[in-house]
Image (cartoon, rainbow, N blue to C red):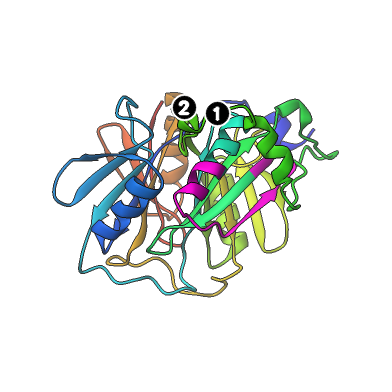
Amino acid sequence: MSETDSRPSYEMKFGPVVLIAIDLDTMLDFYVKDIGLKMKMRSNQLVELRPTEQTPEPLLILRYDAKAEKAPIDAAGLYHYALLVPERRSLAATYLALGRAGVIFDGHADHLVSEALYLTDPEGNGIEIYADRPRDKWEFDEDNKVQMGTLPLDIDSLLEEVVRTPENEMTAIPEGTRVGHVHLKVTELSRSVAFYQHVVGLDLMSYLGSAAFLSVGGYHHHIGMNTWESLGGPVRKDGWSGLESITIRIPQKQLNELSSRLADNPFPYSTDSGKLLISDPDGLELLVSPS
């Protein structure tokens, strides 16, 4: 029996991803005017962005810091955060709506378990927008590791999903979109895999030499990581733009178990009102709270 089989399954959800922005106006032009997210100002320094004004929680929070420095390209940080849209039809609408807005895609791919579009915001933060294939279409090997790949996306097939949809119903980020996973740049892969697997408590779903994917509940991945640009680079420093924190919600039982594991490990963490703020081996912050 594999380690993935033997562990109790539970659900993990993401709250908002928090990014530090140097030029807030330019970032808001992109996220609000081009992407179509709805803005709510919490202060002069903090902006929440969500699919609709009625969406109860933001997908993204921008924290304005004009004095922040751009992180070096080889530093630990965000590779991309990934927005999971409700269905394949939604992804087709995203493709058309962003194209009409003049957004330039970095690329698109078929990952076997999902279909994805890629873009980058004005300050270099990577974004994936994706739709999962049905779970019964995912394939696993004898060790219960999920089979993923990077194949060309069949755009023609995707667009057949919306061939009769009126243009005014083509929304780039529809209601029901949520953060599905986060992909990190790390400086030492084995060290980060050990932390997320043995301390945070995720299952290793795929290990590809310079990239790894971990999750709970048999999902293809909640946390991805790679060393493609960042092998041996600097860890995350205060005062840099880009990723400030990831918000994760897990059941109270698993949160208690995580707290116990942290007490026996050297990684910095603090507690506040039942939440854990943890620094991973590269100084990337996880805010973990009960679901």
Mark 1 surroundings within 10 Å by alpha-carbon count, few (fewer than 14), some (14 through 19), many (20 or more): some
Q: Amino acid at mark 2?
A: Gly
56 left or right of 131 in image: left
Residue 103 within the segment the image draws in magenta: yes
> At 73% from the left edge and 38% from the top edge, which residue is drawn?
157
Work out whether 66 lies above or below 17: below
Instruction: Provide residue 156's location: percent of width, then percent of height.
Output: 72, 43
Query: What amino acid type is highlighted by mark number 1?
Result: Pro
Looking at this view, is 49 or 229 the one in front?
49
Residue linked to disc 2? 176
Percent position of residue 73, x then y: 47, 73
Whether residue 204 is visible here, answered yes or no, is yes
Residue 150 counted in the magenta span: no
Left or right position of 169 against 161: left
Residue closer to the observer: 221 or 98: 98
The quadrant of the picture occupied by the N terminus is top right
Can you identify the residue that label 1 sits on?
86
Q: Percent x, y for residue 17?
A: 38, 45
Q: Residue at x 81, y 40 (%)?
A: 143
Q: Which residues are drawn in magenta?
A: 96-115
Q: Quadrant of residue 155?
A: top right
> 140 above or below 17?
above
Closer to the camera in the image, 202 or 103: 103
